[in-house]
Every structure is written in C-alpha cells, then in structure tokens.
Image (cartoon, helix red, strand yellow):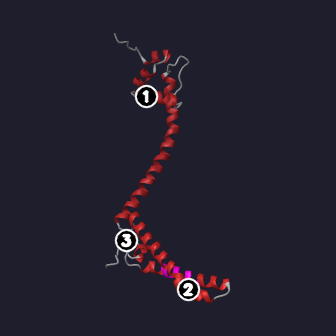
Amino acid sequence: MKKQRTNKADDAVRGMTRREYADYRGKTRQCVDAWVREGKITLNKDGSIDPMRADVELAQSSKKSNAEYMRELARKTGLQADRLALDLTARRGELISSEEALEFWEFTVMNLKSRLRALPTKLASRLASEVRPSACQHLLLVEIDGLLTEMAGTIYEWDKWPNGLTLEALQNGNQKTAAD
C-alpha cells in the first residue's frame, strides 16, 4: 500500500526525502541532488529537506542566478550578433577563406624568397669593388628596401586576389571584381 501525505504542512514538519522533494517541485531527483551539491538548498541534520526553507533558499538563489543568467544571455546574444555580422560579410563576398589567405601568403613568401635569392647575383660585382663594410651594408639595405617597397606596391596592383576582388574594392567594401 502506498503511503499518502495528508498535506504539505505535515511534510514541512517531518522533512522530505530528496525524491519526495523532487516530486513536490515537479523535478527529478538528480536536479535536487544538484541543488544540494551547489549549496542552493541545505539539508536537515537527518539528511531530509525542509520544503519551506528549501523553497525560500531556491527563490533567493534564483534571484542571484537570474542576474548571472541575464549577463550570460547578453554575452551570448552579443556573440550571436557578431557571428551573424560575420556571416553577412562573408555572403557579401567581403571575406576570403583561410585557404585563399594561405595561398596568397605562400605566393608572397615564395616571391620574396625568389627576389632575395637574386640579390647576391645582382650585387656581387658592386659589393666586390667596395672596401668599406659600411658601404656594403648601405648597398644591401638600399636594395632590400627597394625590393620590399616594390613588393608592397605590387600587392596593391595584384589583380588576382583570391575572391576576385581588387585590393581597392576590398578596402572600400565594393562588390566589383577584377574582371568587371
């Protein structure tokens, strides 16, 4: 035969088991166990739960939790807005993929490597005629600076940007491609 409670006041006097309190609140026993573990409700000395006290404790902890929840919700909403803005930017073709960026930098580094490796041949005779180390250093720095300046300029003129846009269009947010 199943034991029946007479009323909630009787439960408050004798205390409830975790299962009984879970049923009373319409929750699972695991939920009540978590509340106890998290310190949201306290147990009586005999391990039972005073439902009136537990209800008050949960109400107080939910007020604190509500502020935490709202902060977390605001943070999450901000992140979702950032993601949507990024998705919109991608759909507009204003972004390039990581693969395209890697392809561009591989091309740039290989181009730089090739040009730097050509410097010894280009400068060998002029360096051989210099006797002062400072003059050699100056000659090398002038050539390297010129090479880097030239490469920086070619990036702006490169008409094969990965997403088909020119650099100017990318910087200005325009939709015109290099083919237009």
Where does label 3 land, which residue?
Answer: 162
Front tag of 2 and 3: 2
Q: Which residues are magenta?
A: 142-152
Residue 130 is drawn in which quadrant? bottom right
Helix, strand or loop: magenta stretch: helix
Query: Which numbered marker is on residue 123?
Result: 2
Query: Could you tell me which secondary element the residue under label 3 belongs to?
Result: loop
Residue 102 is drawn in which quadrant? bottom left
* Circle 3 Cα neighbour tier, 10 Å, few/some/many (<14 / 14–19 / ≥20): some
Check disc 1 and give the amino acid type. Gln
Query: Could you tell me which secondary element the residue under label 2 belongs to?
Result: helix
Find the distance from the CA under tag 3 to the CA under tag 1: 54 Å
Residue 150 magenta-highlighted: yes
Q: Tell me if label 1 and label 2 are in contact, CB under 8 Å.
A: no
Where does label 1 land, which residue?
Answer: 30
Query: Could you tell me which secondary element the residue under label 1 belongs to?
Result: helix
Check disc 3 and give the amino acid type. Pro
Check disc 2 and give the amino acid type. Leu
The tag earlier along the polypeptide, 2 or 3, is 2
- Location of the C terminus by quadrant is bottom left
| Spot occupied by residue 175 in the image (x, y as percentages of width and height) | 35, 73
| Spot occupied by residue 34 in the image (x, y as percentages of width and height) | 47, 30
Answer whether residue 97 is visible to the viewer in this image: no
The tag earlier along the polypeptide, 1 or 2, is 1
For the point 68% across and 86% down, which residue is it? 132
Up-down: is 60 above or below 146?
above
Find the distance from the CA under tag 1 to the CA under tag 2: 78 Å
Residue 87 as seen in the image, left or right of residue 50: left
Up-down: is 10 above or below 62?
above
* Circle 1 Cα neighbour tier, 10 Å, few/some/many (<14 / 14–19 / ≥20): few
